[in-house]
Image (cartoon, coloured by chain):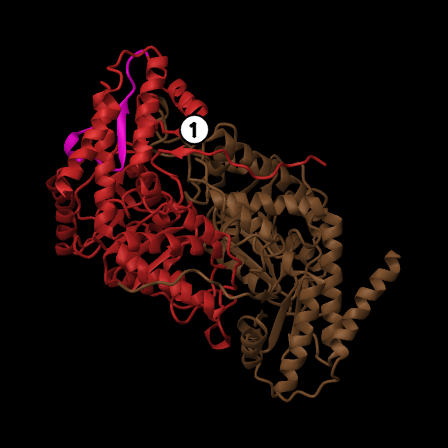
Chain colours: A red, B brown
Amino acid sequence: MKRYKDLAPPPRTIMTPGPVEVDPRVLRAMSYPILGQFDPAFTDLMNETMEMLRELFVTGNQWCYPVDGTSRSGLEAVLVSLIEPGDRVLVPIYGRFGHLLTEIAERCGAEVITIEAEWGTVFDPQQVIDAIRQYRPALVAMVHGETSTGCMQPLREIGHYCREMDVLFVVDAVATIGGVPVYADKWQIDAVMGGTQKCLSVPAGMAPLTYNDRVERKLLARKSIERGLRTASEFQPAAISGHSRIASNYLDLAQLQDYWSPARLNHHTEATSMLYALREGLRILLEEGLEARFARHAENGAAIVAGVRGMGLQLFGNDQARLPVVTCIEIPPGIDGESVRSMLLEDFGIEIASSFGPLKGRIWRIGSMGYSSSRKNVLHVLGALEATLLRHGFKLPAGEGVQAALDVYARKEEVTC
Amino acid sequence: MKRYKDLAPPPRTIMTPGPVEVDPRVLRAMSYPILGQFDPAFTDLMNETMEMLRELFVTGNQWCYPVDGTSRSGLEAVLVSLIEPGDRVLVPIYGRFGHLLTEIAERCGAEVITIEAEWGTVFDPQQVIDAIRQYRPALVAMVHGETSTGCMQPLREIGHYCREMDVLFVVDAVATIGGVPVYADKWQIDAVMGGTQKCLSVPAGMAPLTYNDRVERKLLARKSIERGLRTASEFQPAAISGHSRIASNYLDLAQLQDYWSPARLNHHTEATSMLYALREGLRILLEEGLEARFARHAENGAAIVAGVRGMGLQLFGNDQARLPVVTCIEIPPGIDGESVRSMLLEDFGIEIASSFGPLKGRIWRIGSMGYSSSRKNVLHVLGALEATLLRHGFKLPAGEGVQAALDVYARKEEVTC
């Protein structure tokens, strides 16, 4: 029999746009013994997690809970539960994850209409409003922070217009939740989908989301009780007049909310250890405070931008649209981007990312999210990138990258003093 | 701000049909720092997990990997990836989870034909073969071990007939994998879906599965590259001639296998800590050995059966069809089943289960799976059940349940000596 070695992951400084380093408190939480899913000690933890998610999403919504899957399971859960075949859906695309929303909506049978902004820019909200006026969609799906391009879309005006026009507005906040302000209620977003492995700094495997009563009404109209759970009197399938059945069982939010409700109607078996992790990650976030956390992410993002510019590199993307938690850098002509990434990993133990589609091989992406968003990590990655670029023959003003980042931190301290 | 307490799950002896107790080695694995999903140190762990899954499923299949979701995500992934709208699917039902397969297949747009066996029994394989001959389905989906009724369906003859007739045969082995023999190749099963939180004793949150080249051919015919990942030349959607697109993105096995292949085409972000857990659970399983593990589960199951009978309780279900890892017990007349379960939990720290649908309130279910399947746990639950029943006024021959179980273990030792 082949022997498989003891787990021994090498130490890494993870500066990608996710997954990022996990707070040791969260890792410790996952090492606790599990509980049965209907054990009152466990359902209490589920309820506490829902409460904390309300603070994360800054919402009064009743429904705030995770789907048991990675981030895109939450995107698909919302879209497949809301979209009926033939529904018109508008997706404004400004990067890879807008294409993902399009792809999921298409598979739900939507008539998808897309508008596109060049990668590295975002939409003027008026462009989206004009498209809503022109196409009259039933639902608008949009990405808040595009990790593929390092851009962030302003949402408030679009949310207000959607509400005015009675259009459902659903937002992929996977990359921003917990690192950048996301206000579900204030921005009038009907459903917000988050992720764990980015600014929440919890391992991938859960997709926390929230939705309001506008969404719930739609879900209830499509709801059915699962075969095999119906009692004798319920055994006939519910008549769902005028609405099509939700095409997924696993991602059926109408059934998931019954599981997360006091009724606790059995659906899947809740992922215990991941729930422990999410709960602990949310405790850490609330202890730090949302505003302090956003400020930390903004400062570390600014330090990376200053440091990268300080060493003479060009940033990719529009300055006004910059997502503070992902910095995109043009790979200089003549430099092998993958060779730089390999050297960073092998010699410095640092992981940064490349990108997708049209940007593959054109940019590097440095994330600064959650537990990875620290002064220590920022200075480490800038110093290592400088050394690696020098080693690759790139001419740069040695020392200036790290100094520029230190200047950003020094300014902050002056303001604080 | 409300203070949320430190995580402190109470100690529990979990004797349900899942989730069950987790080996401390697996809990420890989850406490290790994470790695990036494309870090070679991590992709090595992914590859090792695939190798070990081949041993678990006793198969030469190339494709053995987990879906990132709880068990039913694996069921849905296989069904939604294989079933095209209008396909005829046969589901022989003998408990709740047959209904679940039906429900999922219906949502995939299948023309579902069901045959039903009374809960507490299984099918004579010939009945299923006759139904296949009569209805000529494209696919047969069946549950191997029904935790809802404690019954296990023989599969070998059905598998051989399906192969002969060129029908796809997919099996839900969530409850049996790792505790009871499941032979993917020998039984000619085209796709087997397992779970982690039962006999593998890994927390819920992953759905390991395997499928053969008959399944892969079908997947490749329906495959498309994700929007936003296509390079310029691939940017037009692939023409999928004569086949419908897979209705889910998250559960699209054609895309998932690209992610698990050397191409590592980006899909979701692999759930790092859960993968650590699955890998460690599989290492433990292979160290114990499949045959020894099956023998341990059989012995502990036999001890529970003997113990339960020894205290004068009636078992539910057909003796010939008994699933060794879940023992179903008729709740005696006049006894409040939920009150017994509450007392077991609150006074003895033991969790046993109730059941679903027509069996709700009629039976208790005692699981003996994975790390929970131990002599210590069996004797503890029998002693506690006796004490609790006496406290509820049930007349029983005190002491005889535990003695009967000890007799089972003693017989085993005689054989071994």
Crowding around mark 1 (Cα neighbors within 10 Å: few <14, some 14 to 19, many 20+) is some
Observer-nearest of A300 and A175? A300
Question: In the rendered image of this protein, does residue B217 appear above or below residue B177?
Answer: above
Please name whichever residue, B85 or B202, is drawn nearer the observer in this view of the structure.
B202
Horizontally, is A147 left or right of B412 in the view? left
Kind of residue indicated by mark 1: Gly
Residue B110 shows up from this direction: no
* Boundaries of the magenta span: A315-334
> Which residue bears the numbered disc 1?
A349
Does A45 sit above or below residue A128? below
Whether residue A42 can be seen here: yes
Residue A365 x %, y %: 31, 29
Compare residues A227 and B35 and report the one nearer the observer: B35
Badge 1 marks a residue whose secondary structure is loop
**A321 in magenta:** yes
Residue at image point 61% right, 88% down: B334
In-image side of A18 versus A404 (left or right): right
What is the x, y in percent for residue A171?
Answer: 26, 48
Picture layout, residue B331 above or below residue A141: below
Instruction: Say which quadrant the C terminus of chain B sits in.
Output: bottom right
> In terms of depth relative to the viewer, which is nearer, B173 or B240?
B173
Which residue is found at the position 69% from the left and 34% from the top? A2
The residue shown at (61%, 75%) is B363
Counting the numbered discs, the total is: 1
The question of residue B126 being in magenta is answered with no
Residue A318 in percent (x, y) is at 17, 29
Provide residue A45's location: percent of width, then percent of height: 41, 63
